[in-house]
Amino acid sequence: MMDIKHIIIALIVGYAFGNIPNGYLYAKSQGVDIFKVGSGNPGSTNISRTLGKKAGATVLLLDIAKTILPILILHMLWKPATTDDSTMLILFAGIGAILGHDFPIIPKLKGGKGIACTGALIIAFEWKLAVLLLLLFILIVCITGYVSLASMTAVSMFFVLTAVFGRLGMLQMSMDAYPVICLLTFLIAALAVWQHRSNIGRLMSGTESKFHFKK
């Protein structure tokens, strides 16, 4: 598996890309301070609510890109020799991007909830798993209208399905790497839920905003 030096580099490179404030920059280009409208979050959901669905989709794709790019770059530079090394690279670079998005080092910038970055990590990790979780996400949004609930459920199921499918040998990992991969996916899910703590409060009080595909 990856040594500590490569783990640290992957985290740093991912974190640097994660700091790119796509939502803020896009909204600024439209003359809007995204931190002062809607929920004040720079993520694609708030962008969609305040600037329209196309704007939200654009920011979503940009946030996915800033997670995928460091993973691709590091893969090209390092050329991992084993599947375990490749998986670890994806997870650590992806976690770095999520942390950079959620907790940016750039002054005066607010972080997001990291769901788009987490989704990108899952796509790189196992695209078939990503498809299942996307369908689950869409189903929950269609039934409840709550993007936050769908996000937390999908990312929690990422951990659950990784643990189950990994144990059954249905994912590209060895049993030596299995405990570490399970731990990392648990931490990813826990961080996503923690970042939604204000949404959890609104869900419990019935004041959470709903998302509608069509108005």
Image (cartoon, rainbow, N blue to C red):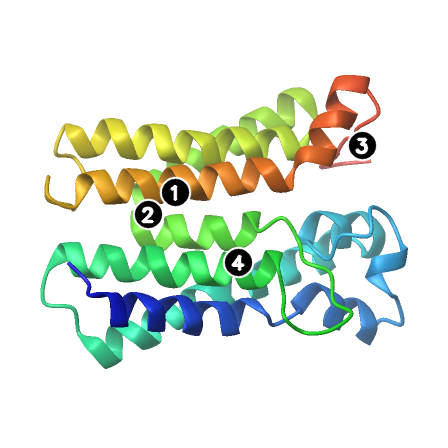
Viewer-side label of 2, 4: 4
Residue 44 position in % (x across, y down) = 68, 53
Type of amino acid under label 2: Trp
CA separation, marks 2 and 4?
22 Å
Residue 3 lies left or right of residue 32; in this view the side is: left
Q: Are marks 4 and 3 in contact (CB under 8 Å)?
A: no
Viewer-side label of 4, 1: 4
* Residue at the disc numbered 4: 99
Q: Residues within 10 Å of mark 1 (few under 14, many from 20)?
A: many
Residue 195 position in % (x across, y down) = 63, 42
* Residue at the disc numbered 2: 127
Type of amino acid under label 4: Leu
Q: Are marks 1 and 2 in contact (CB under 8 Å)?
A: yes
Q: Residues within 10 Å of mark 3 (few under 14, many from 20)?
A: some
The quadrant in which the C terminus is found is: top right
Type of amino acid under label 3: Ser
Residue 55 position in % (x across, y down) = 73, 60
Q: Which residue is pictured at 64% across the width and 62% down the height? A: 58
Q: Which mark is residue 209?
A: 3
Q: Secondary structure at mark 1?
A: helix
Mark 4 or mark 1: name the one nearer the start of the chain. Answer: 4
Residue 164 lies left or right of residue 208; in this view the side is: left
Q: Which residue is pictured at 38% across the width and 63% down the height? A: 93
CA separation, marks 1 and 3?
25 Å
Q: Secondary structure at mark 4?
A: helix
CA separation, marks 2 and 3?
30 Å
Q: Secondary structure at mark 3?
A: loop
Q: Is residue 121 above or below residue 205?
A: below
Farthest residue, direction bottom: 77
